[in-house]
Image (cartoon, rainbow, N blue to C red):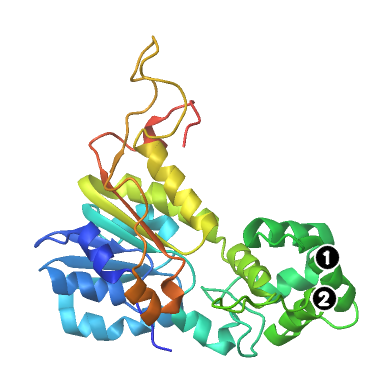
Amino acid sequence: MSHIPVLLDEVVEALAPRAGETYVDGTFGAGGYTRAVLEAADCRVVAIDRDPDAIKRAAPLAEEFGDRFAIVEGCFGDMATLLPEAGYDAIDGVMLDIGVSSFQLDEAERGFSFQEDGPLDMRMARSGESAADVVNTYGEEELANIIYEYGEERKSRRIAAAIVKDRAEKPFQRTKDLAGLIERILGRPPVKKGQRAVHPATRTFQALRIHVNDELGELKRGLMGAEAILKPEGRLVVVSFHSLEDRIVKNFMAERSGNLAGGSRHLPGPVDAGPKPTFELQSRGAVKPGEEEMGRNPRSRSSRLRAAARTEAPAWSASRGKKGRG
């Protein structure tokens, strides 16, 4: 399956590209968002990706757009240091498409999906600890916690116990082996009319992928990185695909814009206590895909877009002192 950028028009609209400005595509992937932004205005895009395959896919864009496009290999959570080191320190917009790309899901040898058999890998950067390492070496309680926290799987303890029992005889090396074990112990849930069948291993695979790549930690660092490098009025646009990601983005933008519940401005006391808001929300709620897009691209169904614009206030990461906020 070719990669179809989710909420593409909405991302470009929220980013509002302008001639002469510089934007960051923190999750380059297949380059769909980057291309759309470069075509929308005579601007520059600096892309970031930790996947060596994505770096290779950037070559045609570099050839087509010349010095208007550049790509940096690394984690988008490190953008606050990666970009200045590469010579970019005046950023007008940051766009992030959180999670795994279609290329990674559709390439069986990457081990992200159980739809086709492949090595139990899941590493976006192709280095470090793999999903097989986690499954075969972590203790039962730690495995259960990972599956529960990152996969929101209520039967995590049952799954972890089965993994530990089976790996004693034969370590897990293939995606089909792990998916088969989970299906065997949980069974296939009944499918209601009009709904899609969800494989019982879906949540566990999601959890392992998030853990192996530290995706939620990466997202938190990336949001703070964007706060640090964006110019006043610079736009931050984030597309997420499940509740764990969206909750982090929603809470970050609400907190940094002064919209988190807690206290009242009508009560006596200094209103400006604590750091000043570093962002202004561009919309109160999340932007969701329309029926047409969901029909054309089923992977877009769970996507949510949130956007905010940078204020002139200093980044909390630099100004919060010992208050511990953020």
Q: Which residue is mark 2?
A: 185
Disc 1 to disc 2: CB gap under 8 Å: yes
Whether residue 6 is visible: no
Instruction: Specify the amino acid type for callout 1.
Output: Arg
User: Secondary structure under badge 1?
Assistant: helix
Q: Which residue is mark 1?
A: 158
**Quadrant in the picture for the N terminus:** bottom left
Which residue is painted at 40% across and 47% down in the image?
A: 224
Label 1 CA crowd tier, 10 Å (few <14, some 14–19, many 20+):
some
> Looking at the image, how many numbered discs can be counted on the residues?
2
Q: Mark 1 to mark 2: distance in Å?
A: 8 Å
Residue 53 badge: none
Instruction: Specify the amino acid type for callout 2.
Output: Ile
* Outermost residue, front side: 193
Q: Residue 118 location, x and y as percent?
A: 64, 88
Between disc 1 and disc 2, whose residue precedes? 1
Left/right of residue 46 with respect to residue 138 in the rendered view? left
Whether residue 289 is visible: yes
